[in-house]
Image: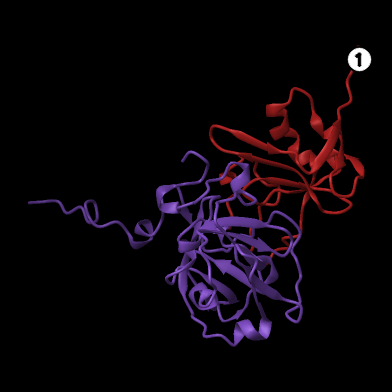
Amino acid sequence: MGVVSPGFHGRPRESSRRLPPGQYETHDFPVLSAGPTPRIDREDWEFTVTTETGDRHSWNWAELTSLPSESPTLDLHCVTKWSKFDTSWQGVSLDVLLTGVETAADFVMVSSYGGYTTNLPLEDLLDGQAWIAYGYEGDDIPPEHGGPARLLVPHLYFWKSAKWVHGMRLLTGDEPGFWESLGYHDYGDPWREQRYQGD
Amino acid sequence: MADMNHHPDGHPASHGHGHGHEDSDEYEDGNAMAGPLSEIFAVDLTSAHGRCANCGITEPVARLRVYTRAPGLVGRCPHCAHVTLRMTRSPDNAWLDMSGTTTLRIPLTTT
């Protein structure tokens, strides 16, 4: 008579399949910040894209929120090892914002109100992979989580998803941002556990 | 709840209450850097006086506003909030950025 050992050789639980190496799941939403929280009025808010030739494209709050929006549900992975599943956002795809922006750039430097920066390859912002989000869980994004608007690039560690996003410079060469210049990985793929330079 | 014991610089934040709507403007004073700095420097640098590269005011490192709930330690000038001192820690390396500090006067003990 066989002894049943349910689950011993079974499929891993869904949460473990969704958890990149070295991460643990949290149900809270930890607040990490490298400085004081900027408080930006929507009337004063602006997002700019500046190309490598100096062409400048800008959107104010009314212009951003009148663009076609999406409501992605995303898993977030922070380099400090927490992951949070099934977060709901509302925002505008970077595909929409960058349509009509003429560029030969391969890289982007994202900048935030408050001075934070982070760098990414341009291709990681396209093809449905990134948003300028202005809604979280059916409400405004709280300032401590990056409101009024933040970048979302959920396939990379969450430090790439700049809070209080203010602009992007399109670059022909890569430059390190705030954490990338201080030992953190230039790309930051959580599934390859690219936390630090050399990982 | 944020488990800051998993902080990459190995420096557990003293604010371990990771509620979603907590005041993220909280910071600690420069003494939060005492342990990590002592790994690199033989002297306690928190009593050293640093000159901010932005506003030019000189203050002891211990008076910095240090943001610890982050992928590293970020020390800001108490007068102008400019980033004067940053540290991160990987398993193999410590990284220190002092580009926001023009000079550091380190008191020497004579015996």
The colour with which the image depicts chain B is: red
- State the image quarter where residue B6 is shown: top right
A3 to the left or right of A97? left
Residue A107 is situated, as x and y percent measured from the top left of the image, at 53, 58
Residue B90 is situated, as x and y percent measured from the top left of the image, at 56, 38
Chain appearing in purple on the rendered image:
A
- State the image quarter where residue B19 is shown: bottom right
Task: Find the residue positioned furthest to the front.
Answer: A53
Q: Nearer the viewer, residue B108 or A61?
A: A61
Location of mark 1 (residue): B110
The chain containing the residue under callout 1 comes to B
Above or below, comparing residue A9 to residue A46 in the picture:
above
Above or below, comparing residue B72 to residue A164 in the picture:
above
Amino acid at the residue labelled 1: Thr
Q: Nearer the viewer, residue B64 or A112?
A: A112
Residue A187 is situated, as x and y percent measured from the top left of the image, at 49, 51
- Visible residue check, residue B20: no
B103 to the left or right of A179? right
Residue B106 is situated, as x and y percent measured from the top left of the image, at 86, 27
Q: Dot 1: within a 10 Å radius of its alpha carbon, few (fewer than 14), some, or many (20 or more) residues?
A: few
B47 to the left or right of B3? right
